[in-house]
Amino acid sequence: MTNLKTTLSAVTLAALVAASFSTIATADAGPRGGARMMFDFATMDANGDGSVTQDEIAAQRTAKIAAMDTDKDGNLSEAELLAGHAARKEERQAKMVTRMMARMDANKDGVVSLAEMTPQGDRGDKMFKRMDIDGDGVIFMAEADAAKARMSESMEKRGERGDHGHGGKRRHGDN
């Protein structure tokens, strides 16, 4: 039983190392989905010498995994994995809100007013008209589903599938 537990812990740790590396090395999607950089260079360059070695990447991976091991027993429990996942999700959401505030807060007063949230010009009208396929002034479920499918297909062609529950590329912070 102990051997099985050790083997399962080793397999889990190996999977986490692989997942951690893919998180570090995944392209960071730019505003239009294009890759900007493979990883946060400044974070990876631990000694600040202007270069990143495999040892620095491995150390970063190890530190991330160790940080998730909150009880410091050398293993990651389901609860620790869930907590780590939730923390990463919160961090991504906080970065998204920060970018949204920067983009929408036109007068830079630290809040987004209703006027700042309202689409500029006729952008909202254009979207409604695009979704209202038969032009009758009402969007039915079939039209909404068709619009969603078109948008998903268009985003997939451009490689812009972000962290919106659609799968594909994930955003890992801005640099």
Image (cartoon, rainbow, N blue to C red):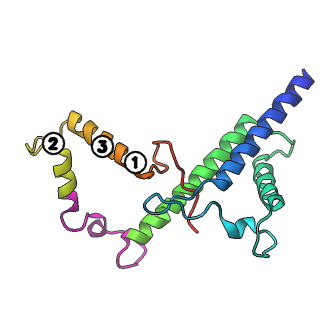
Query: What is the residue that sits farthest to the left in this orientation?
Result: 136
Q: Is residue 67 left or right of residue 137?
A: right
Which residues make up the magenta segment? 104-124
Q: CA distance from mark 3 to mark 2?
A: 12 Å
- For residue 4, which numbered disc appears in the image? none
Tag count: 3
Residue tagged 1: 157
Residue tagged 2: 133
The stretch drawn in magenta includes residue 110: yes
Please report whichever mark, 1 or 3, sits nearer to the chain's N-terminal start. 3
Q: Quadrant of residue 113?
A: bottom left
Q: Is residue 9 left or right of residue 140?
A: right
Check disc 3 and give the amino acid type: Arg
- Contact between marks 1 and 2 (CB within 8 A): the answer is no
Residue 162 screen position, x and y as percent: 47, 51
Check disc 2 and give the amino acid type: Ile
Residue tagged 3: 150
